[in-house]
Amino acid sequence: MTAFARTERSAVVTPAVGLGRGRHIVVNLLVVVAAVLALVSILTLWADRQLLDNNAWKRASTQVIQDPEVRTALSTFLVNQLYQNVDVAQALENQLPPNVKHLAGPLASALRQPATATAAAILARPRVQQLWINTTTVAHEKLVNVLENKTGYGISTGKGVVTVDLHGLLTELGADLGVSASALEKIPPDAGAITVMRSDQLAAAQKGVRVVRVLSVWLTVAVVGLLTFAVFLARGGRRRTLRNVGWAFVVVGLVVLLVRRLAGNYAVDALASPGYRVTVRDVWLIGTQILGQLGGAAILYGLVVIAGTVLAGPMSWATSLRRLIAPTVNRRPGLAALGVGVLYLWIVESGPTHALRTWWGVLSFAVLIAIGLVALRRQMLAEFPLVERRVAADASTEAEPAEARGSVADELARLVALRDAGALSDDEFNRAKALALS
């Protein structure tokens, strides 16, 4: 083994100067504040993307109507509405022969449970499900229009009532149960309507929407700014600070998932009767899917940051891995960039998070990967400064006869020549000289 190989193997990065106590406190405080703001930002992003985005609402409505528990609960509601607004017994009596008209009352009561099963079967039809989707989507458009203080949907801000109109489903159920068309025509237009919001609730809701719209953007900007400033201040301890940032994201993601679970349990226990708890739980899980995705994304991003800081850390396996890839990264950065670019494209193509399905997310991810690759290469150039020279030195040494390289004096002479030629720095020369004389 030549002195060059021994020198490279023993090379270490000079330990970074630690942060001062005051700066250490400021950096940690910035990370904590950013984590708290990130939690609030995730909640506002969920409200913006789930509750105020019509496409997301339409997807959720589709999942809701396809849930068997929801269809059962909705069937019970429709049957109750039908019996409240139509004299089913009278409608059946009008259609029965004279000798059995007295059975209309008991028959109407006996049909109530089968009617619920019939309604569930009706709601399982694709055409009826599409009617539900269209109805709820229109209601959501009206609601968002009112909350954003717009006009054009037939509702005056401050005077309207936003409803989900199930009148069409109600009349279709009555027709399937044999209720006459004349009886169905007498059903009030508001029968089967589910009130979403009344006029006295609009002012507070409109203020809330404006706050959500503002916070969903600026809180994200504030989080990024605070974390960037924290890393900038942490000169001498940036790897440790980045690791803390990663753990902060993991904790925030876990808190979001916990909030989703606890809030769902509260909604089920406080708002739902025992017979509807499974239904309410299913609806809650569907309505908070994006919240769960945001929490999972925060955990994923945090783990990626932690993995990056561990790879750049002092552990023996991480150092060995860096030494293994150093020849490629140091001597062929284009090839290393190509490999990372292929991995980047694969991740973007799979789109594991919402951000990686948007142009700004794809661009930001590319910038962060480029910064990470440059930082890693700079670190490996400092750690393994002889990695390029070792290959050439070993090759030339092997070509020499044994007697030509067996002398310590010859080895020292070669080190002096390399130092004078600028191939070795003074520190590298001294370390190699010490090894040659050992």
Image (cartoon, grey):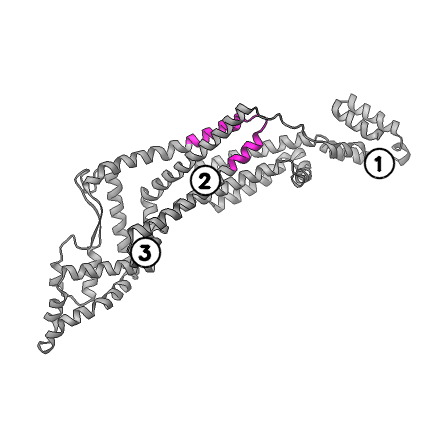
Residue 289 can be seen, yes or no: no
Q: Nearer the viewer, mark 2 or mark 1?
A: 2
Residue 306, percent from left and from top: 55, 39
Residue 153 horizontal side relative to residue 408, left or right: left
Q: Residue at x 48, y 35 (%)?
A: 364
Q: Secondary structure at mark 1?
A: helix
Q: Residue at x 70, y 30 (%)?
A: 385
Q: Find disc 2 in the rendering and name its residue.
A: 252
Q: Secondary structure at mark 3?
A: helix
The disc placed on residue 194 is none
Q: Amino acid at mark 1?
A: Ala
Check the image and name the residue furthest to the right.
403
N-term-proximal mark, 3 vs 1: 3
N-term-proximal mark, 2 vs 1: 2
Q: Find disc 3 in the rendering and name its residue.
A: 277
Q: Residue at x 50, y 30 (%)?
A: 28
Compared to 188, does 386 lie above or below?
Answer: above
Looking at the magenta stretch, what is its main secondary structure? helix
Compared to 270, does 184 lie above or below?
Answer: below
Residue 111 horizontal side relative to residue 385, left or right: left
Q: Quadrant of residue 417?
A: top right
Q: Quadrant of residue 53?
A: top left
State which region is magenta. Answer: 221-246
Marks 3 and 1 close (CB-CB < 8 Å): no
